[in-house]
Structures are given as structure tokens and as C-alpha cells.
């Protein structure tokens, strides 16, 4: 920049976090021949609804259960939504169990300004013939971990309260968890506060328990999920499928485009949760890098921040090893095709 020339109005603040390089994934990936046994813990939830549809549609996933947690909406709405979404997708045989209504500590946090009071915008889903399992989320997950012939992957796509309770109540089962592929956190900025992403902000203590558990973790944070964006053309592609599931997905996307669009000035939907599920069905869709992730459980402006250290020399100085692979890149066009193709397989 020549001397004396002002940059006012043209310079943009540049993030300074260390850009860790992509590494080979450690999360397992399913195949049609050997589908991945998966439990989704969710707060449906507009993007949760698409993540669940993706899991039902993909032959690489064997969806063993959906458990619910309060987050986007009240946990009762989330449970009703999970039952009805699975029914819509032709998967009402997948068991649903309700979990925690709120965080381990502190006030309940909701995202109804994005998802609506019901959690699914203005959409009305047909009732399901199924009812929630009486044992509740943590006991259902524990029973599946005990009884399934091989370790099971868990995809938490809401606040991590149920998973923290599982790890505290059943520590002996942590080695039956093959991998935790979660949507949450951010190496950079948050979305709920400048520091914190919603799922972690809603229960930072639970997130800290999960990240310190020693269970292998993939963290699909905002760094990658803000690349997994749908725009208005995707709405038309889903509606054009001419199916019940495609029509409902279009309704949910339409609602989200408007709500998230208010933040960014153009209709868009970050399909955060579907990135966590897509990573388990497709081996080369998401690039990941190694970070040591610690959760700020203080009560200052950084509460709920996932503090990610991707710089080896700094980690060594602290005597810490990476505890998570973090999503850093996704091909947006391919991601949209994956979603639309999945919904083309649903009733
Ligand atoms: O920050 C995005 C996350 O918060 C997603 O899981 C979305 O469903 C909301 O729960
Ligand atoms: Ca969610």
C-alpha cells in the first residue's frame, strides 16, 4: 500500500487463528455393505431434521436410535418432532427416547428465534404411530452400547447434556463408543455469542466433559458448517422431488432461509447438523485437521468458547495432545447434491 494512502473502508479484519493442515480422517465411515451403527442425539431443529433424513436415506448408515435434548426448542417439542420426522421418512421403527430438558448447570438456552417455538418453523408433521421409549435417552443409549455387537458411533447434533450424563453414569461404556462425530463449537467466532456456538453455549460444562473424555471426537464446528450453506435454488430442487419428504424439507429450508437470511442479508441456511452425518457416510466430503480443544466454562464473555489449538509447538509447550479432529473444509455444491439425492430416496 503506497505511503499515505488510507485503507479506511477497504481493509477487512483478518482472523489470526493458526490454520492447521488437513490430516487423514480418524472417524469411521460406513459402506453400503457394512453400514455404520449410529445413534443421533438431537434437538430437532430445522437442520437436525435434514441430518436425520440424511441418516435414514444413506445406505452407509444404520440408524439405531434418535435421542432428544432440549436446545433449539423445548425437549417435548424435539421429541415429538423426532418421532414425526422418522415417520415421514418411513423409519418409525427407529426408537426415540427423550433426554435432558436443559443444561447441567445454569439457565436453559433456546434458539427459537431461528427454529420457531415448535423447533420446525411453521411446519405441521403428521403424528407418528410410535411413542418415546420409557427408559429415556441415557438408558436407551447405554442399552444399545451394551448390547450392540460392535462399538457404536454417536452423532450429537444438539447440546451435549445427554452425552455428558452417559459418560458420567456409565463410564464403563465409553469404550463401546466407536467415535463421537458432533456438530458444535468453532475454532473461530461463535454464533450465539461472539465466542460461542449454540450447542456448546447451551451447556459448556457438558461439552467440557465430552472433550476431556478421551473418546475419539470429530468436531464439525462453524468453521466448516458455515460452508455447508443452501440458497434458494436448493429449495426448488427439494420441492421439485414431488415427495412428502422433499416437500417438508423444502418447507423447513424455506423457513430457515428467511430466519438466517436476516443475519446475513441474503436468504441462506447453514445446514450445520447434516455435516456431522454426511462425514460418517462419505469418506472424502469433509477435510479435517487436528486440534486440542478446551471448553471455556467460565462466566465471562468467552463462556462456551471451544478454544482450539492447532499449533504443535504450542501444544507441546502445554503438554497437551490433540483431542479432536475439526472440520475445516467442505465442497458446498457437492454437499447440496448429497442432501437432495438423499431426499430423492425418501418417501
Ligand atoms: O450452532 C448450530 C447448532 O445449533 C445446530 O445444531 C442447530 O440445530 C442448533 O442446535
Ligand atoms: Ca441441532
Image (spheres, rainbow, N blue to C red):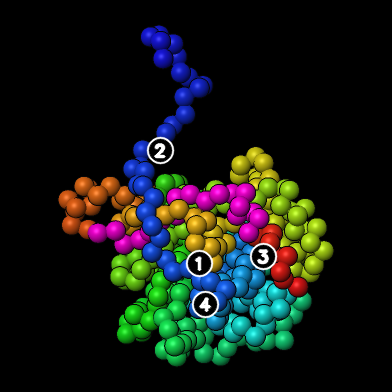
120 in relation to 308, above or below: below
Classify mark 4: helix, strand or loop: loop
Q: Nearer the viewer, mark 1 or mark 2?
A: 1
| 10 Å crowding of disc 1: few (<14), some (14-19), many (20+) | many
Q: Secondary structure at mark 1?
A: helix
- Lower sequence index among marks 1 and 2: 2
Sequence order check, earlier mark of 4 and 3:
4
Residue in front for this viewpoint, 78 or 315 = 315
Q: Nearer the viewer, mark 2 or mark 3?
A: 3
Gap in Å between the C-alphas at discs 1 and 2? Answer: 29 Å
Label 4 or label 3, whichever lies nearer to me, is 4
Disc 1/disc 3 C-alpha distance (Å): 14 Å
Q: Mark 1 and mark 4 in contact (Cβ < 8 Å)?
A: no
Q: In the shown orientation, is residue 266 left or right of residue 309? A: right
Q: Is residue 259 visible?
A: no
Q: Residue at x 72, y 48 (%)?
A: 232
Comes first in the chain, label 2 or label 3? 2
Residue at the spot of label 1 = 280
Foreground: disc 4 or disc 2: 4
- In percent of width and height, residue 300 lies at 35, 52
- Tell me what residue is drawn at x 75 percent, y 55 percent: 237
**Residue 17 image point, x, y percent:** 35, 42
Above-or-below relation of 299 to 42 = above
Q: Which residue is mark 2?
A: 15
- Residue 116 belongs to magenta span: no
Judging depth in this view, the residue of 141 and 30 nearest the camera is 30
Magenta residue span: 321-338
- Kindly identify which residue carries mark 4: 34
Please identify, in this view, whether the residue under mark 4 or under mark 1 is nearer the observer: 4
Amino acid at each position: 500500500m503506497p505511503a499515505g494512502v488510507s485503507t479506511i473502508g477497504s481493509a477487512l479484519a483478518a482472523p489470526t487463528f493458526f490454520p492447521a493442515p488437513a490430516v487423514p480422517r480418524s472417524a469411521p465411515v460406513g459402506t453400503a455393505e457394512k453400514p455404520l451403527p449410529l445413534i443421533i442425539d438431537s434437538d430437532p431443529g430445522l437442520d437436525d431434521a435434514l441430518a436425520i433424513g440424511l441418516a435414514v436415506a444413506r445406505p452407509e448408515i444404520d440408524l439405531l436410535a434418535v435421542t432428544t435434548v432440549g436446545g433449539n426448542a423445548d425437549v417435548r417439542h424435539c421429541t415429538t418432532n423426532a418421532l414425526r420426522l422418522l415417520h415421514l421418512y418411513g423409519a418409525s421403527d427407529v426408537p426415540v427416547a427423550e433426554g435432558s430438558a436443559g443444561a447441567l448447570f445454569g439457565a436453559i438456552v433456546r434458539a427459537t428465534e431461528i427454529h420457531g417455538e415448535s423447533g420446525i418453523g411453521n411446519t405441521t408433521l403428521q403424528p407418528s404411530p410410535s411413542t418415546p421409549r420409557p427408559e429415556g435417552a441415557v438408558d436407551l443409549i447405554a442399552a444399545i452400547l451394551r448390547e450392540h455387537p460392535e462399538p457404536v458411533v454417536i452423532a450429537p447434533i444438539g447440546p451435549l447434556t445427554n452425552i455428558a450424563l452417559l459418560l458420567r453414569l456409565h463410564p464403563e461404556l465409553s469404550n463401546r463408543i466407536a467415535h463421537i462425530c458432533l456438530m458444535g463449537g468453532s475454532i473461530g467466532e461463535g454464533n450465539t455469542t461472539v465466542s460461542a456456538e449454540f450447542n456448546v453455549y447451551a451447556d459448556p460444562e457438558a461439552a467440557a466433559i465430552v472433550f476431556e473424555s478421551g473418546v475419539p471426537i470429530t468436531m464439525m464446528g462453524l468453521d466448516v458448517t458455515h460452508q455447508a450453506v443452501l440458497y434458494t435454488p436448493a429449495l426448488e430442487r427439494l420441492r421439485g422431488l414431488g415427495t412428502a419428504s422433499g416437500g417438508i424439507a423444502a418447507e423447513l429450508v424455506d423457513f430457515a432461509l428467511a430466519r438466517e437470511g436476516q443475519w446475513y442479508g441474503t436468504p441462506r441456511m447453514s445446514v450445520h447438523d447434516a455435516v456431522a452425518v454426511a462425514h460418517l457416510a462419505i469418506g472424502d466430503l469433509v477435510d479435517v485437521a487436528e486440534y486440542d480443544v478446551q471448553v471455556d466454562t467460565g462466566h465471562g464473555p468467552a463462556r462456551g468458547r471451544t478454544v482450539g489449538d492447532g499449533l504443535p509447538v504450542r501444544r507441546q509447550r502445554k503438554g497437551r495432545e490433540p483431542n479432536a479432529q475439526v472440520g475445516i473444509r467442505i465442497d458446498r455444491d457437492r454437499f447440496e447434491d448429497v442432501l437432495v439425492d438423499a431426499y430423492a430416496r425418501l418417501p
